Image (cartoon, helix red, strand yellow):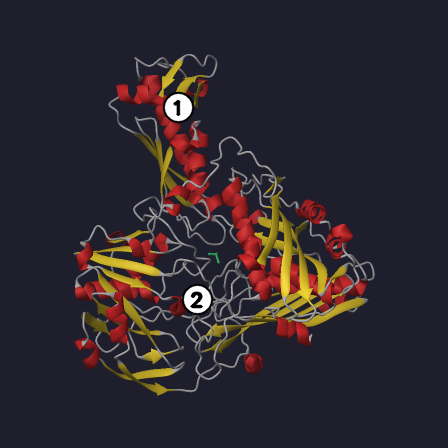
Amino acid sequence: MIRNNQARPTPEGQLEHRYDGIAKVTGKAKYAAEFTEPFPKKDLVYAYIVHSTIPSGSIASIDQKEAERAFGVIAILTPFNVPKLTSAKPHNLSILQDTDVHYNGQPIAVVLASSLPFARQAARMLTIKYNQQPAKLNFMGRLDEARPPKQGGREQPGTQRGDLAASMAKATVTVDETYITPLQNHNPMEPHATIAWWEGEELNVYDGTQYISGVKMSLARILNLPLENVHVQCPYTGGGFGSKGTAWSHVTLAAMAAKVVQKPVKLVLERNQMFGPVGTRPTTVNKIKIGADASGKIVGIQHDAIMNTSVMDDFVEHSAGTSRMLYNSEANATTEKMVEMNLGMGTYMRAPGEATGTAVLEIAMDELAHKLKMDPVQLRLVNYAETDPSRNRPFSSKHLRECYTQAAENFGWSKRNAEPGQKTEGNKQIGYGMATATYPANRSAASAIVRILPNGRVFAGSGTQDIGTGMYTIMAQTAAAALGLDPTLVDVKLGDSALPKAPVSGGSQSTASVLPAVDAAARQAKLKLFQLAMQDTHSPLYNAKDTDIETKDGHIFLKSNPSTGESFTALLTRNGAAPIEAEGSAEPGPDKNSMTTQSFGAVFAEVAVDKDTHMVQVRRVVGTYDIGTLMNNKTGLNQLMGGIVWGVGFALHEEAVIDPVYGRTVNGNFADYHVPVNADIGDIDVSVLNIPDTKFNPLGSRGIGEIGITGAAAAVANAIYNATGKRVRNYPMTPDKIMQA
Ligand code: MOS
């Protein structure tokens, strides 16, 4: 077990610190909006997006005469003057191709000026007239309008297993409640930003993104360009959490504007502009019914979820998905339906589906445990799913039982008083709660390139992204391990669409997708190095067999006699000093559909609830995770901790409030949309089992960007119940809700 709060010597082959750590803390790491090259900096034009101020209708007119005369203004793009695109307009993007308004905050114009303040000032001088239509803004009052999704998401919207009614009839204890999760917004430190410039018919962009290839494909499709004419770069991404997995309107608008003004255009969203046009996590209302027999064995689970969607297009937040597979139950039925609203699009947000799904199901499980007078951990063990009940197939590797045991021990769960409201310290009520964490282990095809250089260093490149997660670090480690080198000798490049293609840095898939490709490329480069030596009459390895050769510490030598060999540098220098280069690809094996690849964890929380103010302080969170091989102690454990911080925010703080009349996000800023700050976070103790899952991929590692948020919110919610005896079923659990419960 590897634990964050214990002494952890850096294992051999791991970098102790982030590859990009020094570049980041010294400001040398450039984010999309910070580039001033290769175009002349003085040519840079600043764009400011104008957003609609009505939630539904159309734009009747935009009078731009006054704004055009404002100082520094270069151009103003509106639906009335923008170049019309010949390609089909994506229906979920607002790129000024029509005058329709689908939500308050929709991009409806772009002002271009010689500075950002000039552009922003001129934007206020536009006179915009609307034809307003009645807007769909009341979600809770329209739940009976819920309909199935128009097209499926990544899972079926509804499933049935067994005979639910017959099984439920056998239940001696039943929980039947409704749980609500609110609309939430991603709040990466780096706002969305794009710089676009054209060289003839070739489009270049710097974009803060989780998916350079996706941005490239979107721009080529929308602007009708050959794919090879679009070049996307993003060496660093200041967080994305799903919102930067999609090229939203501003990316295309920046490219269109750059074409109009024939200059490089920089478009950065203000914090407030990120509440709506770049994706949200939908509200979910979850009716959950669980029946169990007297021994605690679950006989049936029914989970009916209703979420909001946008009138523009559907996005399914699969909050019922977890209820199909986390526990055994002989019968199971789920539905996912949606209510259309005049809001921006829903999208993936850290552990989409599982974050909400565990937040609600794991309170219901806690309620069931209390009704059964059973320990919540014991209830989960009684209903432990050895195989995936939703797909009736084995897991590639599942060690959740050890997670419960380890985390319970690390937390001190045995000291919990099962009777709520019993433990106090002064005017604080103290409570313990727990929940299960889970997230799929995803993997896609990826490619990488590795070069062995005559100077003894190695280059590893892939068209992936580092969204703050540690991809630079683990790419360096993987290339180094394959070649037998110290990882500090590897130079990594990513975030450039000219590099071999890799998937979106989403769905926690990059580790399992990109590293096998880097490993394959490095192994092929190593074979080429062997062949060079074997064919070189001056090499000590001339005529040796490749199976007899090994490399270590920048040397190539005979396994049987390590003193027979030479350095990479000597071999390459003698052979023309050209680098050895190989490209490698990797993809999931043919058996991927015969098993479920899934990560698990157990998370425990201690809260102190103030009797007078009902404020909740999360004192401790302890989690143990089964995530395969941990690739790097620092970057890995850090992601799990970050996920837990999100879980605390989910439980206590985060909610985007929509004005019921105007449809704008009322709290679209960091003063009012609360995310946890240091003062909100107590001690976090995360550990991983570090058991390789080699059926999933040769490195045995599963991605961990998302699992940390799962379960954490419910662990806090259940701890609040244990502290106070008050069951809140509506996130976030703010003092007013606790007071009224
Ligand atoms: Mo993640 S929400 O799949 O970027």
Total marks drawn?
A: 2
* Spot occupied by residue 221 in the image (x, y as percentages of width and height): 30, 61
Task: Name the residue: 34% across, 57% down.
Answer: 215
- In the image, is residue 512 above or below residue 92? above
Vertical order, 643 against 285 (above or below): above
Q: Where is residue 609 drawn, in percent x and y?
A: 68, 65
The residue lying toward the viewer, choosing from 472 and 66, is 66
Residue 160 visible in the current orientation: no
Task: Give percent across and percent down for residue 219.
Answer: 30, 60
Local SS, label 1: loop
From the image, which quarter does the C terminus lie in? bottom right
- The numbered mark at residue 650 is none
In the rendered structure, which disc, 1 or 2, sits on the residue that comes first in sequence? 2
Does 494 sit left or right of 115 as displayed? right
- Residue occupying image coordinates x 58% and y 39%: 692
Mark 1, other Cα within 10 Å: few <14 / some 14–19 / many ≥20: many
Residue 249, above or below 2 = below
Instruction: Name the disc covering residue 554, or none.
Output: 1
* Amino acid at dot 1: Gly
Q: Residue 726 is drawn in which quadrant?
A: bottom right
Report whether residue 514 is seen.
yes
Image check: 426 left or right of 127? right
Q: What residue type is labelled 2?
A: Gly
In whole angstroms, how far apart are the C-alphas of marks 1 and 2?
47 Å
- Is residue 545 depicted above or below 664 in this figure? above
Q: Residue 279 carries which label?
A: 2
Please state if 367 lies on the left or on the right of 100 as rendered. Answer: right
Q: Where is residue 636 in the image (x, y as percent from the top left)?
A: 52, 44
